[in-house]
Image (cartoon, rainbow, N blue to C red):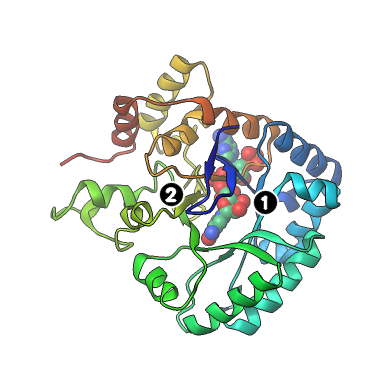
Amino acid sequence: MRTIKLGTSTLEVPVIAVGCMRINSLSKSEAERFVRTALDEGANFFDHADIYGGGACEEIFADAIQMNDDVREKIILQSKCGIRKGSFDFSKEHILASVDGILKRLKTDYLDVLLLHRPDALVEPEEVAEAFDTLQSSGKVRHFGVSNQKPMQIELLKKYVKQPIVANQLQLSITNATMISNGINVNMENDSAIDRDGSILDYCRLHDITIQPWSPFQYGFFEGVFLGNDKFPELNQKIDEIAAKYNVTNTTIAIAWLLRHPARMQPVIGTMNIERLKDCCKAADVHLTREEWYEIYRAAGNVLP
Ligand SMILES: NC(=O)c1ccc[n+]([C@@H]2O[C@H](COP(=O)([O-])OP(=O)(O)OC[C@H]3O[C@@H](n4cnc5c(N)ncnc54)[C@H](OP(=O)(O)O)[C@@H]3O)[C@@H](O)[C@H]2O)c1
């Protein structure tokens, strides 16, 4: 599997991250087969969060991969904290307690990457900085990042946090590409020009923060999968046509479209289907042409100015 450096760190990560949010839909033997296949494909970067399955996803994963020191060395583990029932919480106390819970459930003594899951309106960046220092000096967390944050929120954190922010996990798919569209439609009167994220794409490129697109196959907020969906006839026709040309599936092309962006993103895939997992991994070796990338973008209903 092709790798990239995560943010400004020296950590080499596969370009495809395996999201474990849905692993609790698998039986024990299916989960074992799933993680084994991921490792066989070179997809050894696993994305978790303390809230997935109420903590069950991390436990199921640790059992499925039969976590021990030997296994731990061969994989890269990322998890997230900061979402509570009905609120968000970036307090020092909550971050530290969350990481202890994560480590226990994942049966490990360190995380490669910890992300703050979703912005907390009541964030005190000084407290986040103290939490990160404690986690780093105790060896519990090696790298730090955020999720769903815009540039000014990251800047606020950076005023106090010493550790580099290596990743920002953001919603991004072919049908949910507002962060790309607003850069194409600067200052236009159409809706695509609306800057919903403070130009996060350019900000992350400027600061070498790896964007991890989440839900790469979904449209809307978990409304469904756009591939093979009657709501997107033109898009599916175009993706199928390009898939046939490369002799791969539509799944591969949907991920290849994200990987073609020069921001060097690391999509977080959510499939629990072994064949689709392999198809996603194949995308690491497909390099779409500039024309194909724009054809797919336009087929999704995006209009160039
Ligand atoms: N940071 C955040 O706020 C945030 C939010 C959401 C998710 N995440 C992370 O991102 C990961 C991915 O999210 P996601 O699971 O929503 O992403 P996704 O990969 O877009 O969606 C996966 C779901 O779509 C289905 N699917 C994919 N392709 C399909 C196809 N061609 N036909 C039919 N069904 C298809 C999968 O079913 P099968 O299993 O049957 O393939 C699975 O149920 C999560 O695991 C999590 O790690 C982060």
Q: Residues within 10 Å of mark 1 (few under 14, many from 20)?
A: many
- Mark 2 to mark 1: distance in Å? 17 Å
Instruction: Give the secondary structure at mark 2.
Output: loop
Q: Is residue 85 visible?
A: no
- Look at the numbered disc 1 and say if its residue's Cβ is closer than 8 Å to ligand 1: yes
Q: Is residue 254 left or right of residue 71?
A: left
Q: Compared with residue 172, is residue 147 higher up or lower down, i.e. above or below?
A: below
Residue identifier under label 1: 20
> Which quadrant: the N terminus?
top right
Where does residue 199 sit, x and y in percent of width and height? 30, 58
Where does residue 59 sit, x and y in percent of width and height? 80, 59
Q: Amino acid at mark 2?
A: Leu
**Residue drawn at 50 percent across, 72 percent down:** 162
Q: Compared with residue 190, is residue 142 higher up or lower down, i.e. above or below?
A: below
**Residue drawn at 48 percent across, 54 percent down:** 8
**Residue drawn at 53 percent across, 78 percent down:** 129
Where does residue 130 sit, x and y in percent of width and height? 57, 81
> Which quadrant: the C terminus?
top left
Counting residues from the N terminus, which is met first, the one under dot 2 or under dot 1? 1
Q: Residues within 10 Å of mark 2 (few under 14, many from 20)?
A: many
Where does residue 283 sit, x and y in percent of width and height? 52, 30
**Residue drawn at 64 percent across, 35 percent down:** 277
Q: Compared with residue 288, is residue 3 higher up or lower down, i.e. above or below?
A: below
Q: Compared with residue 214, is residue 248 higher up or lower down, i.e. above or below?
A: above
Residue identifier under label 2: 172
Nearest the camera: 101 or 227?
101
Q: Is residue 44 left or right of residue 236?
A: right
Nearest the camera: 196 or 167?
167
